[in-house]
Image (tube, grey):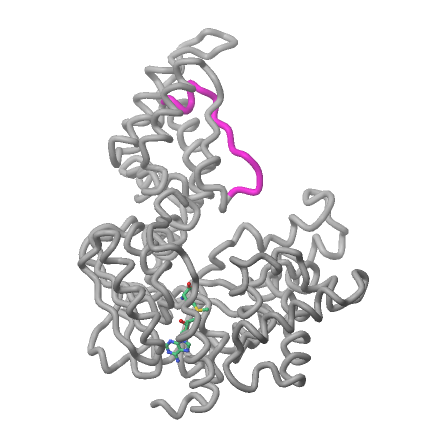
Amino acid sequence: MMECQQPELLEKIRQQYETSPYPQAALDDSPKDDLNALFIHNIVTSYYLRYQKVIDTKGKVILDAGCGSGWKSLMLAEANLGAKIVGIDISEESVKLSRYRLEHHGFDHVEFHTLSIYDLQNLGMEFDYINCDEMLYLLPDPVAALKVMKSVLKPEGIIRTNLHSALQRSGFFRAQKLFQIMGLTESNPGDLEVEIVLEIMKALKDGIDLKVKTWNSNFEKEETKQSVLMNYLLQGDNGFTIPQMFDMLQKSDIEFISMVNWRLWEVTDLFKEPENLPIFLGMNLPELDIEQRLHLFELIHPINRLLDFWCGHPQQGKLGIPVSQWSDTDWFNGKVHLHPQLQNPKAKEDLIECIEKQQNFEISKYITLPAAMPVYLESTVAACLLPLWHGVQPISSIVKRWCETKPKHPVTLESVSEKEAWNEVKKLLSKLEVFLYILLEP
Ligand SMILES: C[S@@+](CC[C@H](N)C(=O)[O-])C[C@H]1O[C@@H](n2cnc3c(N)ncnc32)[C@H](O)[C@@H]1O
């Protein structure tokens, strides 16, 4: 299936990463404390978004397609304890580094192969989750790559992948064209070509459009040489719009699930008064589907470098019931989990301190990605959630705890009835579930 990529371009891409495996993260570095990154890479997050259930990562098989130097493979391993991690890349040097990195951090349930994505079926494996990060946009035929990934994805499996935004990155695409015409990308660009780019960009006047759109002085630092290669001199780089992304999904018969950084794609955030939108827009917006809303966003404010999304096999009718549509019985029998990335000793320690000092608990400060602004919980409310740090709880036990910690109405001093407590807990959990800080199962 190798003919899916023009062999010459494939070789240029391979060479670029063979001499400069990506990213250049130090071997000792660990993503352990990067809770936002772990939140994305933890397959619990995307499975919950799609199926409204909390899966066990133990025994799951995860593919890192185009694993590069293994930094993201390490994130996948850290975020999904007990899962098997399989990595592939066409650059042998990158594969070696990945293998070494995971071994260095004590992960042995892993395997890495020097393999093109188009030959994935040769592995004879099926995956619960495929991470294909920062690679799809390099391929001349991304639809063929999506189809191959789909062919090795389990029926309920999920793919996370991304494309470069044509609109956000338009400056770099112009710069790449410019340096291509100058002959800098004819063979494998290295230190000399990086120096030439730096000299030209620095020599341009500050107000010149290409400089305004692409340049920042960080490119000059020794340790960011790779950024010059990965932006101004990237081989095979392509940009896409939201309609092109959805068109590719349709051609591969794959269903869109969600943007990975969904909170950074909200159209109403772009307006001064989201509650009071211009009337024409206010009337039309609710009629738009997700593709149209995302496209509107990128046309108005193309700030996201990546169109980064989760997708999977079409699943008509097999998805879970959203919390907003739960019946009283669903609530009554329901269970509540803390998101695994919040399940950490530091958050628990902070919570206990807030309860003891009667201070608000800022639940959003650990995983900031899903929240547009800080989310605070009043200390007696936060106290009701403390048992979640011990593990999954029936919702009814949170209600019981509410009755114990907040037994009286603070104004009338009348006793809080169980029904009132249920309503308060439902409101609290529904609010926190939007951020996936807590996960609810009927
Ligand atoms: C920008 S790096 C991304 C590495 C890693 N996924 C990350 O996000 O840190 C792109 C990687 O894709 C690999 N690659 C490019 N074309 C490929 C192909 N056809 N099959 C497998 N890997 C490929 C390159 O060798 C390179 O390591």
Specify whether residue 252 is in view: yes
Can residue 316 be seen by looking at this rendering? no
Q: Quadrant of ligand 1?
A: bottom left
Comparing 113 with 412, the one in front is 113
Left or right position of 86 against 117:
left
Q: Is residue 174 above or below residue 134?
A: below
Tell me, yes or no, whether the highlighted magenta stretch contains residue 373.
yes
Expressed as whole percent of the image width and height from the top left, the position of residue 31 reads 37, 49
- Judge whether 18 appears above or below 354 on screen: below
Magenta segment range? 371-383
The N terminus - image quarter: bottom left
In which quadrant will I find the C terminus?
Answer: top left
Q: Residue at x 46, y 90 (%)?
A: 8
Q: Nearer the viewer, residue 376 or 98?
A: 98
Q: Is residue 368 above or below residue 252?
A: above
Please name the residue shown 29% across and 50% down the image: 78
404 and 122: which one is in front?
122
Q: Tell me if 99 is positioned left or right of 429 in this view.
A: left
